[in-house]
């Protein structure tokens, strides 16, 4: 039997096994692209002649009422850059739904359109994520920090649905003041530091066992006023020790047996005595500057 005759059945078998999945994947990609394009077209029609720019920046559709150049810049630099870096380090899956990012050019536009489009009166001047409306609503005049923070949340939702508020907000808050270091997203110190340092001086910051065991309602109630900051600077500490990505991976993998993340935190840190660790962390925080 010739070599050609020998290999022909093998080639047919390979084609039979591989080509259908490839065709199915290509078809799924086309359907996804069509869905995003259709969503953007529907929004463009709805907003016709109102000065809005609508762009697809997967897994989002970005909508803004600033100049087309500015909206494009936000979409291609902040949104795309943040998504790329977050997926590189943490998240394998995109959000299940098409989400909209609304970038309003100033506070009057932000408050007016939040009310008009979402029936909502914002309780923050910066922006927020509305899961029920599948939208991130931003006053982009305040900068891109809140936008980066809020982009984290739908990715956590898709990849770590049981994530407690303390880590969800800690990770989001870490990147509200961020850049790129060594090819990875990196959180810098930010405005939350002063409140945390004051809380440490006044001894109003809870233990990490208390923080991690808070229900979402307890965390957001902010009795001490330091919950966000404490969670952020715990994530910052893990980042500085090269442990943050490992902690996320291990916590997500073991959430059923360790839903608060406290045992995983202790194991990743390599700390037996968390009271002693908290003193070490507090000393670390008190030396930081912003």
Image: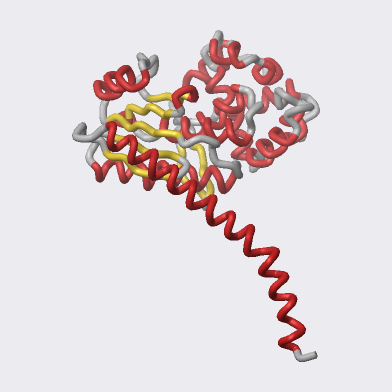
User: What residue sits 51% from the left and 16% below the top?
Assistant: 198
Q: Is residue 193 visible?
A: no
The quadrant of the rendering that contains the N terminus is bottom right
- Please state which of residues 81 and 135 is positioned toward the viewer in this rendering: 135
In front here: 250 or 192? 250
Residue 175 at x, y = what percent? 49, 35
Above or below, 218 relative to 172: above
* Foreground pick, 261 / 57: 57
Residue 253 seen from this side? yes
Q: Position of residue 91 (x, y in %)?
A: 59, 42
Picture quadrant where residue 148 is located: top left
- Image coordinates of residue 111 in percent, x first then y, are 30, 19
**Colour scheme in the image?**
secondary structure
Q: Work out whether residue 269 or residue 164 is closer to the camera in this orientation and state it.
A: 164
Quadrant in the rendering for residue 105: top left
Is 170 positioned to the left or the right of 267 in the image?
left
Q: Is residue 56 left or right of residue 216?
A: left
Q: Is residue 275 left or right of residue 182?
A: right
| Residue at the image point whose x is 31% and y is 45% from the top | 72
Residue 182 in picture, x, y percent from top left: 53, 52
Q: Exactly how many numbered labels are in the figure?
A: 0
Q: Is residue 128 above or below residue 87?
A: above
Quadrant in which the C terminus appears: top left
Residue located at (27% from left, 39% from top): 53
Q: Residue at x 42, y 42 (%)?
A: 79
Q: In this image, 49 relative to 271: left or right?
A: left
> Of all residues shown, which one is farthest toward the bottom?
2
Furthest-left residue in view? 49
């Amino acid at each position: 039997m010739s070599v050609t005759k020998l290999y022909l059945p093998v080639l047919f078998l390979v084609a039979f096994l591989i080509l259908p999945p490839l065709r199915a994947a290509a078809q799924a990609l086309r359907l996804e692209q069509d869905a995003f394009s259709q969503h953007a077209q529907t929004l463009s029609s709805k907003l016709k002649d109102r000065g809005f720019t609508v762009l697809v920046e997967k897994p989002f559709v970005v909508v803004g009422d600033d100049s087309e150049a500015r909206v494009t810049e936000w979409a291609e630099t902040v949104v795309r850059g943040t998504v790329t870096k977050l997926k590189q380090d943490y998240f394998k899956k995109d959000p299940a739904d098409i989400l909209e990012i609304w970038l309003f050019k100033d506070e009057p536009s932000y408050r007016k359109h939040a009310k008009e489009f979402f029936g909502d009166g914002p309780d923050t001047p910066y922006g927020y994520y509305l899961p029920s409306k599948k939208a991130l609503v931003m006053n982009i005049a305040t900068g891109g920090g809140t936008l980066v923070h809020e982009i984290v949340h739908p990715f956590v939702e898709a990849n770590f649905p049981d994530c407690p508020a303390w880590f969800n907000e800690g990770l989001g808050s870490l990147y509200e003041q961020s850049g790129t270091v060594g090819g990875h997203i990196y959180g810098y110190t930010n405005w939350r530091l002063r409140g945390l340092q004051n809380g440490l001086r006044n001894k109003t910051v809870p233990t990490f066992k208390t923080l991690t065991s808070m229900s979402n309602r307890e965390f957001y109630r902010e009795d001490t006023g330091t919950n966000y900051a404490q969670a952020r600077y715990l994530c910052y500490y893990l980042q500085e020790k090269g442990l943050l990505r490992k902690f996320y991976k291990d916590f997500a993998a073991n959430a059923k047996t360790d839903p608060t993340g406290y045992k995983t935190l202790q194991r990743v840190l390599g700390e037996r005595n968390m009271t002693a660790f908290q003193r070490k962390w507090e000393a670390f925080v008190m030396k930081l500057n912003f």
